Image (cartoon, grey):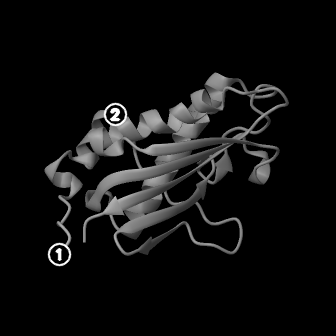
Amino acid sequence: MSEPVPVPVSGVVDVYARLADLGLTLPEVAAPLAAYVPAVQSGHHVYVSGQLPLVGGELAGAGKVGAEVSPERAAELARICALNALAAVEALVGLGRVVKLVKVTGFVAAAPGFTALPAVVNGASNLFGDVLGEIGRHARSAVGVAELPLGAPVEIEIIAEIAP
């Protein structure tokens, strides 16, 4: 028995129109900081490497959340990470092929005692919902870490299912 063919996003929501309506532009894909690629496709899934809050190649904020960075600012930075993740999908296969955002993992460089990790990662989750609508609802982990690359306060990675 063959698998059902997923319906492309274009049949559910026009991602590009939604981006325009939100006043968002996909950035250039950030160059990898080490020996990896921004995203890879395996079967009907795209795995996006962890995205930092880079704007124009520069880190938009640095420090620990709950110390140098407020939770509200960290959520804004997570939103930037999410937009960078969408840009990586666009560059590899095109956002029009996304049928489901499957998993989001958010890493938060947390000051000792800071436990509001989910609220920070909501910045990314809300962006995905705003842009992708219902197909942007996802499973998620929010993980506190001691350090992130370049001293970033947050990093977001995603797994997306795509149409053949």
Q: Quadrant of residue 60?
A: top right
Decide: few, some or many residues near mark 2? Use Cα within 10 Å; few <14, some 14-19, many ≥20: few
**Residue 135 or residue 70, whichever sits in front:** 135
Residue bearing the label numbered 1 = 2
User: Is residue 5 shown left or right of residue 142?
Assistant: left
Residue bearing the label numbered 2 = 22
On the question of residue 86 being in view, the answer is yes
Q: Tag 1 or tag 2, which sits nearer the N-term? A: 1
Q: Secondary structure at mark 1?
A: loop
Tag shown at residue 53: none
Q: Report the residue that reaches farthest toward the front.
A: 1
Residue found at x 16% / y 76%: 1
User: Is residue 85 shown left or right of residue 62?
Assistant: left
Location of residue 139 with respect to 48 vertically, above or below: above
Give the residue type at disc 2: Leu
Where is residue 102 drawn, in percent x and y? 41, 52
Residue found at x 70% / y 38%: 61
Q: Secondary structure at mark 2?
A: loop
- Distance in Å between CA atoms under marks 2 and 1: 38 Å
Where is residue 34 drawn, in percent x and y? 71, 70
The C terminus - image quarter: bottom left
Residue found at x 57% / y 36%: 121
Q: Report the residue that reaches farthest toward the right.
A: 112
